Image (cartoon, rainbow, N blue to C red):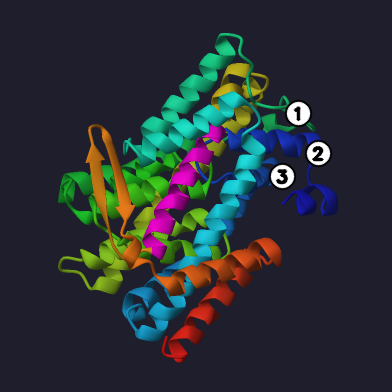
Amino acid sequence: MHRVAVEEKRWLDEPRFLHALNFCMLLPGPEAQQLATYVGWLLHGIRGGLAAGLLFILPGAVVMAALAAVYALYGRLPAVEAAFLGVKAAVLALVVEALLRIGARALRDGFAWALACGAFAALFLFDIPFPAVIAAAALLGGARAFFGGGSGAGEAAAPAGPTGSAGRRSGTGRLALILLAVWLLPTAVLLAWLGGGHVFSGIAVFFSKMAVLTFGGAYAVLSWVAQEAVAARGWLAPGEMLDALGLAETTPGPLILVVEFVGFLAAWREAGGLDPLVAGLLGAGLTLCVTFAPCFLFIFAGAPHVERLRGRPGLQAAFAGVTAAVVGVIANLSVWFALNVLFAEGARTEAGPVSVYLPDPASLDLKALALAALAAVALFVLRQGAFRTLALAALAGLALFAAGL
């Protein structure tokens, strides 16, 4: 986006682009999609923002809906399961790569390391909910700046570049109210009509909460989605969460589209009187609505006033605390994926407030281990991208199936 918007098209200068990026990084939700919306708004007002943001999502959303339907219909075929074993192994390598990449950027001092380790322990050992972990990290980061311990936010935000956003403020307030209604009205109607126990109400409520707490990118959010959709609600099995991430890695658009797959399968399995495919598509559409409507809302409501956020050390420090904690969140996701990919069985051990899932060493899946090692070599040694790594691992899984292994 930087190469096209700044260097090639010269739509924005460097300071304005960096200022927009800093603002989007402070928001919950996928910052790439929000940055696209912001750039479109800067160039052509509301119409530009809506066009850029929607077209950033729609291609991937259509592809993911189609893949989710194919998965639900044919995912239990032996050959398909063999391919997805390779996909799961590759996803494990991709999550570890994300952990190392984000950790190298975020863990620059002892305080950041402490937040990361604390977040990992809170999730892995004590099963503390993801929102509480993120809120605690933000409070600790802000408190550090307040008491003079340094902001931990790195360089200050770059000054804004060209002016002219004032002329684009017209109409953003009305649009923000419309987006707020698009976001919250479906949830309210579903709760009143179907009650809190229905799958559509559950999708609307959970992903609405997720939309305002998705700091740190998709990999961080997946830890909470897995905790809620797999462990608490039973919408998916652990292996299906890995399949969802593998499919999302192969589609255009933001990685957070993985939640569309979750909404599709949840509604598919609890369709009630609806056709399962229709229910799945409705669940996917509802998930997209309550996930992305807030993203547009935050941009159109905040962009005209974004100058007020620049140079606030407490806010920057709070975000730095969240970024550090995200490393621990992704570490927890890596361990969770590894336990579910490499071992077929395990049991939860409890000792006071500590609750740990321990695998059965005898259930180690040697095929999954070999495929994960192959994916790691492709990613870390051969420097292949995510798509090629996933394709290679899937083909290797099929080859093992064809060989009768």
Report the residue at 64% width, 68% height from top: 378
The secondary element bearing badge 3 is classed as: helix
The residue indicated by pointer 3 is: 43
Report the residue at 46% width, 91% height from top: 403
- Sort mark 1 into few (<14), some (14-19) or many (20+) by Cα contacts within 10 Å: some
The residue indicated by pointer 2 is: 14
The quarter of the picture where residue 93 lies is bottom right
Report the residue at 82% width, 53% height from top: 9
**Residue that sits furthest to the front in the current view:** 362
Give the mark, 2 or 3, whose residue is nearer the N terminus. Answer: 2
The residue indicated by pointer 1 is: 158
- Sort mark 3 into few (<14), some (14-19) or many (20+) by Cα contacts within 10 Å: some
| Magenta-colored segment: predominant secondary structure | helix
Residue 209 visible to an observer of this rendering: yes
Range shown magenta:
322-342
Task: Relative to 141, say whether 324 is above or below.
Answer: below
Task: Relative to 393, say whether 352 is above or below.
Answer: above
The percent position of residue 194, horizontal first and vertical second, equals: 16, 51
